[in-house]
Amino acid sequence: MIHEVDEGLRRLLADSGLEASGVEVVFDAPTRDWAARRSAPTVCVFLYDIREDHTRRGSGGGEVYDADGFVVARRTPPRWFELTYLVTAWAGRPQDEHRLLSQVLSTLIATDTLPPHLLTGTLADLGLIVAVDAGGTGLDAPAASDVWSALGGELKPSLGLRVRAPLAGISKVTSPPVTEGLVMRSVPQAQGGVPDSARRLRYTEASEPRPDEGFGGPRERRPAPARRRRGERQP
């Protein structure tokens, strides 16, 4: 999920015109050595804090369907996490860095959620909202000055960015649907009797069982009934 959030942010900033201007968007730690190697205008989006939002932890679960509409797995509810980033701009002059940071700020504050077309992987599959909050950090997240001290770099203008994203639940594969009937054999009460007849229960269209067969016999799989959408009345 974390790398999918990174990709969504990279696409968002690239679409804002940074990519067309030759500005690189990276997710490296802005250490002193890293900064010394920078030669091109760069926007650094550094992830430094990850915390679960316990207030959004749910219960129950959901179902996963195949192309035919059959349940193939059951999944636990997603868990939500807050990802806190430190966004900085790097260029040859402070004025250029401020201009880059201003462009990034304008893009982020105009975006409350990552658009669906920018999401990939599990974030796209879940179809849930990925919230973006620019200009602030989490209540328990380290301060920007503490981050710079830990990185060993010089303090410079930075933008706090917080993203709330869901982590997909664990899927457990379910047993395949029952497509075979129960075979019943009648046996005489006399000692040493052998089955004199056999018939398959429930599925009349299935073939007659073999003498050594209990459960078995192929049967055409019927399509699953159409699922009703929420709020839709049943005819």
Image (tube, rainbow, N blue to C red):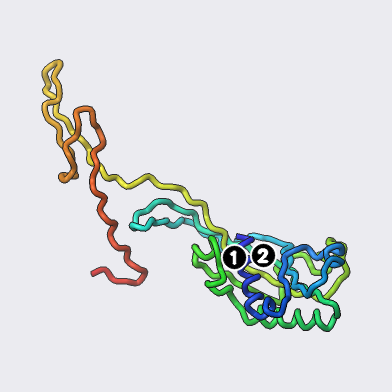
For mark 2, does the 10 Å Cα neighbourhood hold few (<14), some (14 to 19), or many (20 or more) residues? many
Residue at screen point 35% across, 68% down: 229
Q: Please state which of residues 183 and 12 is positioned toward the viewer in this rendering.
A: 12
Say which quarter of the image contains residue 67: bottom left
CB of mark 1 within 8 Å of CB of mark 2? Answer: yes
Q: Indicate the position of residue 126 as horizontal and vertical percent values.
A: 50, 63
Residue at screen point 18% across, 33% down: 184
> Looking at the rendering, in which quadrant would you find the N terminus?
bottom right
- Residue type at mark 1: give it: Ala
User: From the viewer's perspective, is residue 93 above or below residue 223?
Assistant: below
Residue with the mark numbered 2: 83
User: From the viewer's perspective, is residue 24 above or below residue 177?
Assistant: below
Q: Residue furthest top?
A: 191
Q: Element at badge 2?
A: strand
Q: Please state which of residues 18 and 65 is positioned toward the viewer in this rendering.
A: 18
Q: Earlier in the sequence, mark 1 or mark 2?
A: 2
Is 164 situated left or right of 21 in this image?
left
- Residue type at mark 2: give it: Leu
For mark 1, does the 10 Å Cα neighbourhood hold few (<14), some (14 to 19), or many (20 or more) residues? many
> Looking at the rendering, in which quadrant would you find the C terminus?
bottom left
Residue at screen point 79% across, 73% down: 40
Is 54 situated left or right of 91 in this image?
left
Residue with the mark numbered 1: 165
